[in-house]
């Protein structure tokens, strides 16, 4: 990655202190009266870096955000459970208290950023998923001490870069999820880069409305209809032609047991579309099967609800079955892959949903810029 230094460039780190910005924002749950990490993937993937730094003689300090304590000390967001798990996986690494306990973190306060590197000789950013945010722990250390990009951050950036610069064709992108306004930017980039962009999930109904279809009470953003119409006019956007629906007042997600009604074409008044239908699932499967490169971000329906899961499962299985280079990003698509036990069947699982979309959209991230513009080399 051009302009990004690596910790390997530093010689001996004997007697040196290295601060590593990580993203240990792991799920936790109460076990025997105290919070414990329930999925330690984010911690485990950082261990090789910690070990490599320790092997060079460094004492390693890590820093993470954890939940949204909003600039205040909130006991439930203490990093204690993370530190306990870290101690088991890689002893000898000190984890600083939650960065977001200080209001200076999110406001990118230079003095808070400087306080993090007091006594620190080197900085490593190993938090790709936080690098789209111009927060103090991401932005300030690189301007003060020699800094480098960690290995998982680099791998993430390289994978996404390759996707944009030299994808195996056809390049099929699948975008889903609830909010069309959050994802239109990336759909606009993808219609330029990809051969086909499949749009599913709640966001597809604004596209359907732009085609003049009735959508009942499905998710709809009237302010985006025109942009959706322009994207459809490229001829490269494919949207579902059928849906699984429930009456508008029928509960879904948690609770609710009414069987969904499949509809072709328009969603009738008094109903809402909550998953793609069988015909669309088959079409999407065929398109995905022919792909040379696949990018998937966002579910096709309310997959948390067993009744509304089939569309997302069909896409997940098609992506997993493909021999194409496949990149899956976004918390929900990754959760769906895990739900179906398919996380090892894709080429790359991107840890940073928001960060990967921003990288694909803008080709860079504030945190990467800070590393490039900061002090890279040896002391
Ligand atoms: P996002 O955060 O925008 O990626 O959206 C993810 C959420 O979208 C998931 O929790 C899904 O349950 C939800 N979702 C997907 N399809 C629909 C739909 N047709 N209607 C309402 N919610 C949906």
Image: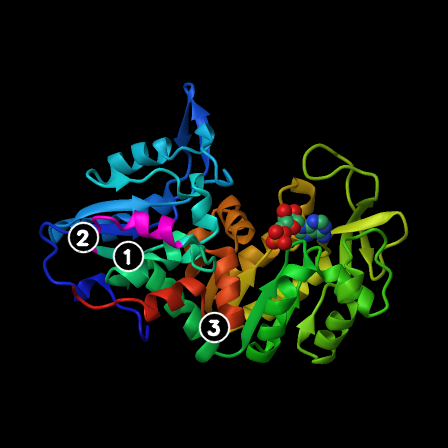
**Residue 329 marker:** none
Q: Position of residue 116 (x, y in %)?
A: 31, 48
Q: Position of residue 81 (x, y in %)?
A: 36, 31
Q: Nearer the viewer, residue 322 or 230?
A: 230
What is the span of residues highlighted in magenta in the rendered image?
A: 110-121
Residue shown at 24%/53% (left/top)?
Answer: 49
> Mark 1 touching mark 2, by CB under 8 A?
yes
Q: Nearer the viewer, residue 306 or 60?
A: 60
238 part of magenta stretch: no
Q: On the picture, is 362 further left or further right than 117?
A: right
Q: Residue furthest top?
A: 33
Q: Position of residue 117 (x, y in %)?
A: 27, 51
Q: Say which residue label 1 marks.
A: 124
Q: Say which residue label 3 marks.
A: 363
Residue shown at 31%/35% (left/top)?
Answer: 83
Quadrant of image for the C terminus: bottom left
Considering only vertical position in the picture, is 117 above or below 173? above
Q: On the picture, is 275 further left or further right than 353?
A: right
**Residue 53 marker:** 2
- Looking at the image, tell me whether mark 1 or mark 3 is earlier in sequence order: 1
Instruction: State the SS at label 1.
Output: strand
Pointer 1 residue Cβ closer than 8 Å to ligand 1: no
Report, in whole angstroms, how far the alpha carbon at label 1 lies from the one at label 2.
10 Å
Quadrant of image for the N terminus: bottom left
- Looking at the image, tell me whether mark 2 or mark 3 is earlier in sequence order: 2
Res 318 visible: yes
Considering only vertical position in the picture, is 63 above or below 233? above
Q: Nearer the viewer, mark 1 or mark 3?
A: 1
Instruction: State the SS at label 2.
Output: helix
Instruction: State the SS at label 3.
Output: loop
| Quarter-of-image position of residue 5 | bottom left
Q: Nearer the viewer, mark 1 or mark 2?
A: 1
């Amino acid at each position: 990655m051009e302009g990004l230094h690596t910790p390997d460039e530093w010689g001996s780190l004997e007697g040196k202190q290295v601060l590593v910005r990580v993203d240990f924002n792991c799920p936790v749950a109460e076990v025997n009266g105290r919070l414990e990490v329930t999925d330690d993937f984010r911690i485990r993937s950082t261990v090789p870096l910690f070990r490599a730094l320790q092997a060079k003689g460094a004492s390693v300090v890590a820093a993470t955000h954890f939940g949204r304590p909003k600039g205040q000390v909130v006991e439930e967001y203490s990093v204690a459970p993370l530190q306990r798990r870290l101690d088991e996986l890689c002893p000898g690494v000190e984890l600083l208290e939650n960065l977001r306990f200080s209001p200076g973190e999110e406001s990118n306060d230079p003095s808070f950023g400087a306080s993090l590197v007091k006594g620190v000789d080197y900085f490593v950013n190993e938090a790709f998923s936080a690098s789209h945010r111009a927060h103090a722990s991401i932005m300030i250390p690189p301007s003060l001490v020699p800094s480098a990009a960690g290995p998982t951050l680099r791998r993430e950036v390289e994978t996404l870069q390759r996707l944009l610069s030299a994808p195996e064709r056809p390049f099929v992108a699948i975008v889903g999820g609830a909010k069309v306004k959050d994802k239109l930017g990336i759909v606009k980039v993808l219609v330029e880069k990809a051969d086909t962009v499949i749009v599913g999930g709640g966001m597809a109904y604004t596209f359907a409305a732009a085609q003049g279809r009735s959508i009942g009470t499905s998710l709809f953003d009237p302010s985006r209809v025109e942009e959706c119409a322009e994207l459809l006019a490229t001829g490269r956007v494919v949207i579902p032609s059928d849906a699984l629906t429930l009456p508008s007042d029928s509960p879904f997600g948690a609770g609710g047991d009414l069987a969904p009604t499949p509809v072709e074409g328009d969603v009738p008044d008094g109903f809402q579309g909550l998953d793609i239908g069988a015909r669309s699932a088959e079409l999407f499967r065929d398109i995905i099967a022919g792909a040379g490169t696949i990018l998937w971000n966002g579910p096709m329906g309310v997959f948390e609800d067993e009744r509304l899961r089939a569309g997302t499962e069909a896409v997940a299985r098609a992506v997993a079955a493909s021999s194409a280079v496949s990149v899956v990003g976004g918390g929900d698509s990754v959760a769906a892959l895990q739900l179906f036990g398919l996380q090892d069947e894709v080429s790359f699982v991107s840890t940073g949903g928001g960060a990967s979309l921003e990288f694909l959209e803008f080709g860079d991230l504030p945190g990467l810029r800070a590393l490039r513009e900061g002090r890279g080399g040896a002391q």
